[in-house]
Amino acid sequence: MTNGRAELDLDPFDVPIDARIYIDYKNISERAISAVKFRLRFTDPEMQDRGTWHAPDMELLAPGATGTEKWKHEKVDPRATALKVRILQVKFQDNSHWVSMKMSELANPTRGATRGGGGGSASPPQSNSIIPDISQQQAPPANADQHGNGGGQAAPANQEPFSLGR
């Protein structure tokens, strides 16, 4: 991701009731991307999960192109203080895939994404911003899936086919 932000709507007591999340991301691989699956997670000051969900983007993205996405999340736990965004999976136009280590862990039945969240009233008188926790990652090698992987992992599991940073 090249940019990201979340805006919270607050009730009259400064408790978050919903969020609008905006991200920009860039395809730094040498292949066109046909779909991306993101994981978004609200956390509290102790980094505990306060709401997790997956959000796909099916925008065709040529090599070097930039994509944008926006989501509205209706329920925000009042203890949430941060938002983390992770790329879980990428499908390339040639039908090959890149899968993050976290996505592999989610596929394991003993581990899985939690669902959290809370509710609130529907009157949004003010707005605040939460900066996503976006860590710097490397691009996959240019020849990552040119050796007959046929839809397998296109990059080492700790690398994502996007430029990430603030």
Image: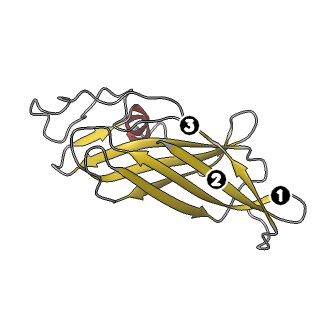
Question: Tag 3: Cα neighbours inside 10 Å, few (<14), some, or many (≥20)?
Answer: few
Q: Amino acid at mark 1?
A: Val
Left or right: residue 42 versus residue 163 is: right
* 2 vs 3, front mark: 3
Q: Is residue 152 rendered to the left or right of residue 68?
A: left
Disc 3 is placed on an element classified as loop
Mark 2 lies on a secondary structure that is strand
Query: Quick check: 78 above or below 120?
Result: above
* Residue 118 is at least partly visible in this image: no
Residue appearing at x 27%, y 38% in the figure: 29
Q: Which residue is mark 1?
A: 15
Residue that carries the numbered disc 2 in the rendered image: 6
- Secondary structure beneath dot 1 equals loop
Residue 109 shown left or right of residue 15 in the figure: left
Q: Amino acid at mark 3?
A: Arg
Q: CA distance from mark 3 to mark 1?
A: 26 Å
- Where is mark 3, residue-wise? 166
Residue at far right of view: 13
Viewer-proximal residue, 2 or 120? 2
Residue 148 horizontal/vertical position (percent): 9, 33
Q: Which of the two discs, 3 and 1, labels the residue nearer the N terminus?
A: 1
Q: Residue furthest left?
A: 148
Q: Amino acid at mark 2?
A: Ala
**Extreme bottom residue here?**
123
The reply to whether discs 3 and 1 touch (Cβ–Cβ < 8 Å) is no
The first of marks 2 and 3 along the sequence is: 2
Mark 2, Cα crowd under 10 Å, few <14 / some 14-19 / many 20+, is many
Looking at the picture, tell me which residue is in the foreground, 14 or 54. Answer: 14
Residue 105 position in % (x across, y down) = 42, 35
